[in-house]
Image (cartoon, rainbow, N blue to C red):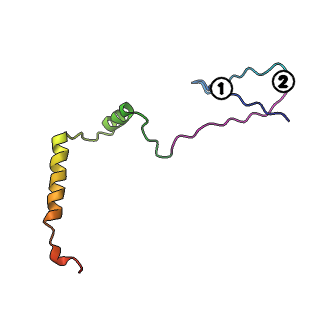
Amino acid sequence: MRAIKMTASISAEHTLSLKLPADVPVGIVEVIVLYSEAPATDKPRTLEEFTQRSQEADIPCRTKEEIDRYLEEERNSWEHDDVRDLPR
């Protein structure tokens, strides 16, 4: 048995067309298709894709000022925790 490795493109109709070397005999063959699977998390690959998905998911956008204010509030809460309750 002989193997031929080629790169091919799958069309939108999910068809595959190959032009084989002339020395391949006519007849029935076995075809194996290897492809990269999408990551299980299906992460966006570009900033544009990320932005589009965020908009589609109706995730509220926050301004830099809103994020800075939130972080400042979190930091302040750490400083005001009662340290008397911590183990010594």
Q: Quadrant of residue 78?
A: bottom left
Residue plotted at (18% across, 57% down) = 74
Q: Helix, strand or loop at disc 1? A: loop
Say which mark, if any, is on residue 64: none
* 17 up-or-down from 78: above or below: above
- Of marks 1 and 2, which one's residue comes earlier in the chain? 1
Residue in the foreground of this view, choosing between 57 and 35? 35
For the residues labelled 1 and 2, the Cα–Cα distance comes to 17 Å
Q: Horizontal placement of 66 versus 41: left or right?
A: left
Q: Horizontal placement of 16 versus 88: left or right?
A: right
Spot occupied by residue 35 in the image (x, y as percentages of width and height): 62, 36
Q: Quick check: is 49 in the magenta stretch?
A: no
**Badge 1 amino acid:** Ala
Spot occupied by residue 28 in the image (x, y as percentages of width and height): 83, 29
- State which quarter of the image contains the N terminus: top right
Residue plotted at (33% across, 40% down) = 57
Say which mark, if any, is on residue 8: 1
Residue in the foreground of this view, choosing between 6 and 51? 6
Residue in the foreground of this view, choosing between 70 and 75? 75
